[in-house]
C-alpha cells in the first residue's frame, strides 16, 4: 500500500479511500488497484456492485472547459470496455490554483488538465493530446478508440494528423478568439477579426473533411476515434 501520493497531491479523503478500496471478487485483499488487478478479475462475471466499485487507477485534475472535457470523455468511453474508473479533483482556474507550486510540479505549463496514473508510480501526464495517447497506448489495448500503429499505420497517422491539427489550431485559435471577443481588457478589432477568421477557416476545413465521412479518421466513412474526441469539445 502506498500513501506517498496522498500527501504529494491534494486528494479528497473519499477519493483516497476509493483508491485503496477492496476489489470485490479479488480475494478480499486490500490492494492498491491497478490494471493488472482488472485483467485477473474475470470481467465476464461482473455484477452491478462490481461495476460501481471500479478500480480507479487515475486521478484527473481538471475543470469544465473544452480541454478538461476531452480527457473526461475518453475516460468515460474506456470505462465499459476496460472497467477502469478515475477520480477527479476540480481545479478552480479563476483562482489560479493551476499556478501553485504543487500543480507546477505535475505540469510545469500550469494548465489543466493533468492526469496522474496512480498505478504507474503516480506518473503525471499533461497536454490533452498527450493524455489521450497515453491512455490509448497503455490501456486501450483493443484499439477501441484508436488505430494500431503497426497493423493500421495509415489510419493511425491520419488520426494523429487530425489530433495535431486540432491541438495546434482548432483549440488555441478558438481560445484566442474567445479571449479577444469576451475577456480582453481593451477592444482590439484587429485581434478579434484575426482569430475569428482563423476559427471560421478551421471550421471550414472540418466541414470539408466531414462532408462525405462520419468521422475524421479511419477507412470508408471513418471510425470514431481519438481524432474526434480531441476535436469535439471545441
Ligand atoms: N495545450 C493545453 C492547453 C490547456 C489549457 O489551455 N487549459 C486551460 C483551460 S481549457 C487552462 O488551464 N487555463 C488556465 C490558465 O491558462 O492558467 C492542453 O491541450 O492541455
Image: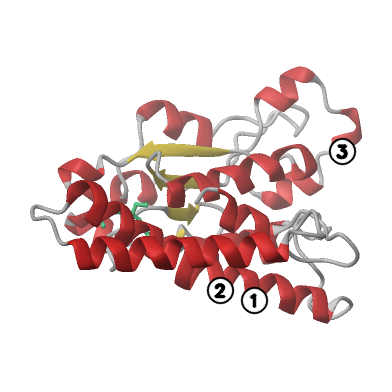
The relative height of residue 16 versus residue 230 in the rendered view (above or below) is: above
Residue denoted by label 1: 161
Is disc 3 placed on a helix, strand or loop? loop
Q: Position of residue 93 (x, y in %)?
A: 24, 45
Q: Nearer the viewer, mark 3 or mark 2?
A: 2
Asked whether the beta carbons under mark 1 and mark 2 sit within 8 Å of each other, the answer is yes
Residue denoted by label 2: 164
Q: Position of residue 72 (x, y in %)?
A: 54, 43
Q: Position of residue 57 (x, y in %)?
A: 57, 46
Image-based side of 47 in relation to 120, left or right: right
Q: CA distance from mark 3 to mark 2?
A: 37 Å
The relative height of residue 213 versus residue 81 in the rendered view (above or below) is: below
Label 3 crowding class (10 Å Cα cut-off): few <14, some 14-19, many 20+? Answer: few
The relative height of residue 77 versus residue 193 in the rendered view (above or below) is: above
Q: Is residue 32 visible?
A: no
Residue in view at x 38 percent, y 38 percent: 89
Which one is nearer the viewer's eye here, 110 or 194? 194
**Does label 1 point to a residue whose CB lies under 8 Å from ligand 1?**
no
Q: Quadrant of residue 175?
A: bottom left
Which one is nearer the viewer's eye here, 147 or 5? 147
Is disc 2 placed on a helix, strand or loop? helix
Is disc 1 placed on a helix, strand or loop? helix
Closer to the N terminus: mark 3 or mark 2? 3
Q: Is residue 7 visible?
A: yes
Residue denoted by label 3: 42
Amino acid at each position: 500500500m502506498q500513501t506517498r501520493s496522498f500527501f504529494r497531491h491534494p486528494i479528497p479523503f473519499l477519493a483516497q479511500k476509493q483508491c485503496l478500496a477492496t476489489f470485490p471478487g479479488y480475494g478480499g485483499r486490500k490492494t492498491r488497484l491497478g490494471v493488472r488487478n482488472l485483467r485477473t478479475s474475470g470481467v465476464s462475471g461482473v455484477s452491478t456492485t462490481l461495476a460501481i466499485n471500479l478500480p480507479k487507477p487515475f486521478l484527473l485534475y481538471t475543470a469544465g472547459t473544452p480541454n478538461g472535457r476531452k480527457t473526461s470523455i475518453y475516460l468515460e468511453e474506456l470505462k465499459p470496455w476496460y472497467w477502469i474508473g478515475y477520480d477527479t479533483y476540480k481545479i478552480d482556474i479563476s483562482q489560479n490554483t493551476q499556478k501553485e507550486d504543487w500543480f507546477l510540479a505535475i505540469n510545469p505549463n500550469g494548465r489543466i488538465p493533468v492526469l496522474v496514473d496512480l498505478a504507474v508510480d503516480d506518473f503525471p501526464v499533461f497536454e490533452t493530446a498527450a493524455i489521450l495517447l497515453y491512455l490509448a497506448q497503455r490501456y486501450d489495448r483493443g484499439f477501441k478508440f484508436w488505430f494500431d500503429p503497426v497493423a493500421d499505420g495509415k489510419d493511425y497517422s491520419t488520426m494523429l494528423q487530425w489530433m495535431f491539427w486540432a491541438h495546434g489550431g482548432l483549440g488555441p485559435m478558438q481560445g484566442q478568439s474567445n479571449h479577444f471577443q469576451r475577456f480582453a481588457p481593451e477592444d482590439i478589432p484587429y485581434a478579434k477579426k484575426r482569430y475569428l477568421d482563423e476559427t471560421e477557416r478551421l471550421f471550414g476545413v472540418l466541414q470539408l473533411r466531414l462532408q462525405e465521412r462520419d468521422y475524421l479518421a479511419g477507412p470508408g466513412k471513418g471510425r470514431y476515434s481519438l481524432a474526434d474526441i480531441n476535436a469535439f469539445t471545441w
